[in-house]
Amino acid sequence: MTDKIGVGIITYNRPDYFEQCISKMPWHKIDECIVVKDGGGEYYNVAESDNFYYHEYAENGGNCRSKNKAFEYLLDKECKHIFLIEDDMLIKDESVFEKYIETAYRTGIYHLMFLKVADNMEHKRLTIDGLDLHRNAQGSFMYALDSVIRHVGEWDLGFKNAFTHIDWTYRAISAGLMPQFWWFPDVENSQDLIEEIPGSTDNSSITNKGKYNENWQQSAKHWIDKYGYFTNRIPDTSEKDVLKRLKFLKETYARVKQ
């Protein structure tokens, strides 16, 4: 049996974006899929099938709860390669899953994220070995190997729609599975594979809702309580040391895709 590809689609109160997102999904490339609707909005009827599951929470509980549900379901279905996709992402090239998986196997980095959103391209720091490394992390489209997910664990429910992906990635970095903080990895030229729905950042139900500042402050406090310092206290790393780390990851973890 080939390694299964599992996809979790995370959505909240944006049926128009959700419909665009799933309309571009290369279903024939996906072995298992779960849609997690975190309350809010009237959606058209989503028909379930043997490899497509729809889970709806009545009340909004934050994207960590939704991502935990997706992880739980896809791991239970024995998916090897797991992608989490938020509802404002559009797939442009149906080879996107294979490209992320191939890059992971070749580089030995088994957590990659799409980073060509908002103004993040301005913060790209390095391109090497089919990887783009950026200063800022983003979680709207991410890939992780099942063993990495089991090692890093669940999303921390103490974060309220802020710092969620940064925290999960920081834990993967601390476990020695990724390049250093401030050097977040993505597939080179991933903008040819995926794009953000135009205007979705401005219309985000997370960043523009009334409680966002409160959520940000609460999540920042939770980070400090958890680690004893804020993210701006995490030191940067020289490019030379990052290159050494990339070499180590490749020599230690790279493998031939089965």
Image (tube, rainbow, N blue to C red):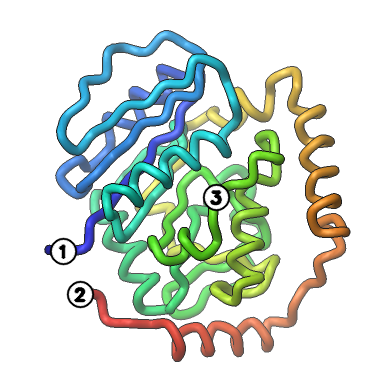
Q: CA distance from mark 1 to mark 3?
A: 26 Å
Residue of label 1: 2
Residue of label 2: 258
The secondary element bearing badge 3 is classed as loop
Viewed as shown, does residue 140 lie left or right of 229?
left
Q: Name the residue: 51% across, 65% down.
A: 151
Q: Name the residue: 47% across, 73% down.
A: 109
Point out residue 180 in the picture as x, y percentages from the top left corner: 66, 73
Point out residue 30 in the picture as x, y percentages from the top left corner: 22, 47
The amino acid at mark 1 is Thr
The secondary element bearing badge 1 is classed as loop
Q: Residues within 10 Å of mark 1 (few under 14, many from 20)?
A: few
Question: Quick one: quadrant of the N terminus?
Answer: bottom left
The amino acid at mark 2 is Gln
Q: Residue 154: which numbered mark, if any?
A: 3
The secondary element bearing badge 2 is classed as loop
* Contact (Cβ within 8 Å) of mark 1 with mark 2: yes
Q: Check the image and name the residue furthest to the top.
A: 42
* Contact (Cβ within 8 Å) of mark 3 with mark 2: no
Q: Considering only order in the chain, which callout, 2 or 1, is on the residue closer to the N terminus?
A: 1
Q: CA distance from mark 1 to mark 2?
A: 8 Å
Q: Name the residue: 67% across, 54% down.
A: 167
Q: Check the image and name the residue furthest to the left.
A: 1
Point out residue 49 in the picture as x, y percentages from the top left corner: 16, 29
Near-viewer residue (116 or 2): 2
Residue 188 visible in this rendered orientation of the protein: no
Q: Residues within 10 Å of mark 3 (few under 14, many from 20)?
A: some
In front: label 3 or label 2: 3
* Contact (Cβ within 8 Å) of mark 1 with mark 3: no
